[in-house]
Amino acid sequence: MEISRPNELFSRIWIRWALGFFLVASLLGLTMRAFYVVEIPLVEYRHILHAHSHLALLGWGFMMLMSGMIFGVDREANLAQKYGWLFIGLLISLVGMLLSFPVQGYGAVSIAFSTWFVLVSYGFVFKFWKTLRQLPNTTGIRLIRWSLIGYLISTLGLWALGPVTVSLGRMHELYFMTIQWFLHFQLNAWFVLGTLGLLVFFAEEKGLRVLYSSNQFAVLLASVVLTYALVITWADPSPVFFWINSLAVVLQAFAYAVLLRKFWILLPLLQLDGFVKLMIRLAILSLFAKAFLQMLLVLPEVAVISYTIRMYVIGFLHLVLLGAMTLGLAGLAMAEGRFPISLFSKLGWILILLGFVGTEVLLFGQGTLVWLKLGYLENYHLGLFVCSALFPLGLGMAFLSLFSSTYSLDQPLLTPSISNQNKSQTMKKTMIWSLGIVAMLMTSCGGGSESQSTASDSGTSTTSAPATADPKGIGEVKSVELGSGVDGALADKGKAIVDMKCTACHQLNDKRLVGPGFQGVTNRRRPEWIMNMITNVDVMLDQDPEAQKLLEECLTRMPNQNITVDDARGILEFMRKNDEEKAGQRDAAAQ
């Protein structure tokens, strides 16, 4: 493909921003891992989580995929003139989210920047769609078109969040289903179909045909829609939705196998660098792994644990985002000359690969141990932190390689198609405006105030509970006899259960991870309430006002782990011991 000087300049600036956001997202992710290893003061875990997820999905995912489409498909001589102002709007929204989410989490400022991002993204889709209409309807172009449609469909979940929250509240099943709607179509339609479309289009540009019939397309698209049934089973575990999901994952496996097999056979004919082939092959294998794991969901028991064990959820998200999309698009960018293939760059991507494989093994391995009730791997969280540290190290090297002399604009271009000085100057002025506006934003936008932050206290709320709320909670535990001291043997029994089932989401201090920290809980909650929350979690979340407040703060529904009353008594005893050691007081709520 011929490339003009303004387009090469625009492409390299775009890539540097995208990889820069990916690097920041990886540092935020490493900070989240550090919460499990050391105590981090003055930082709210949930806020870091929101910043990490938004930069990973939007700053890296959207920017990298959209750049692949624009610079790989659009043939206009000056793409900065076409997309430049939208690009600036994209940077403003992303830098705004980077500055606001760590300070206020979900608040007025961060939501405003997130909304601005969606509106700007519509501009990209609209402009690029007009380009696609002028191209032959090949398999690659059809996949790209459907990925754009999937992206638009995914954003319907975002627009529905406001009305659902106002009318039904954050505890309603529909609230969680709208969030999952966005994530489902982002992962399965936008990222997967978009990556496949670009890979296939690249092969087609080399003169290789990838035939995919209309019936096979219909099966692929049907699987994308029907696999959403798994989300519905969370709210309504009716057998019919399990069967729909079972059918969908079978259809998906068939559709993936047909398309990926065709591309795998053609891959050696593309005459790519060996490292580039490795990256693309690993992306394809990640999609095969995705299809295989989802095939296991034909069993309802496995389908339930897929969204109740957090390690599985994170591992699956990373499999798509880091395995399929990141490796596939990075390999494609190297093949097209938009990423350097220097030794330094390769070393960086090797570290990223090692981090990806290491974290996936730990996440899926530990998730399986939790499922089998075999406890936790020794130093599991430390191992996850070390593997996660490879991401910023590798990304830092890959980012620096974008500024190396072998990747300089002073080097000869591939095949210059125009040398219009005015267009090049227009491009440079646009980029200067981009950097200037972002710099102004960074100095003027500081996020929200303390009043908008989510409280880190696991149970404290400034709004008093309704007068009818039972301080003992709802469940079979009506009375608990507490000894004058802590029963050491019972506390050790409880600790074993906490290590096995609770530490993935809770810390023993007062810092919130996914759920609230355990420190001080016996001083805030009656022992009966604690045990009922452990043994009767679904009813408590649906009916108990205090449990509903926690759900509204954490936005993650605590899974029912089928803990018996006897085991819950051991957990309570361990919490009493933990409060005595860390808070210096216990059982204040029972007095």
Image (cartoon, rainbow, N blue to C red):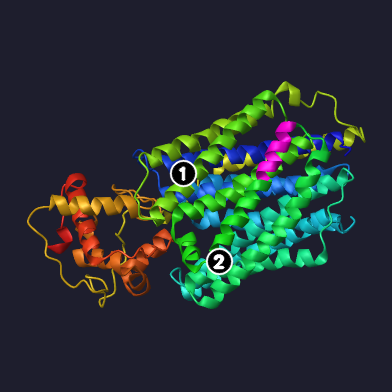
Residue 289 shown in magenta? no
Q: Please, what is the dominant secondary structure of the magenta stretch? A: helix
Name the mark on residue 252: none
* Position of residue 232 measured from the top left corner of the image (x, y, whole percent): 53, 71
- Between 484 and 459, the one nearer to me in the picture: 484
> Looking at the figure, which quarter contains the N terminus?
top right
Callout 1, which amino acid? Leu
**Above or below, 201 relative to 347:** below
The residue lying at 12 percent from left, 52 percent from top is 486
Q: Helix, strand, or loop for circle 2?
A: helix
Give the label, 2 or 1, closer to the camera: 2
Image mark count: 2
* Position of residue 56 measured from the top left corner of the image (x, y, whole percent): 58, 47
Q: Name the residue under label 1.
A: 362
| Residue extent of the magenta highlight | 274-283
Q: Distance between the residues labelled 2 and 1?
A: 24 Å
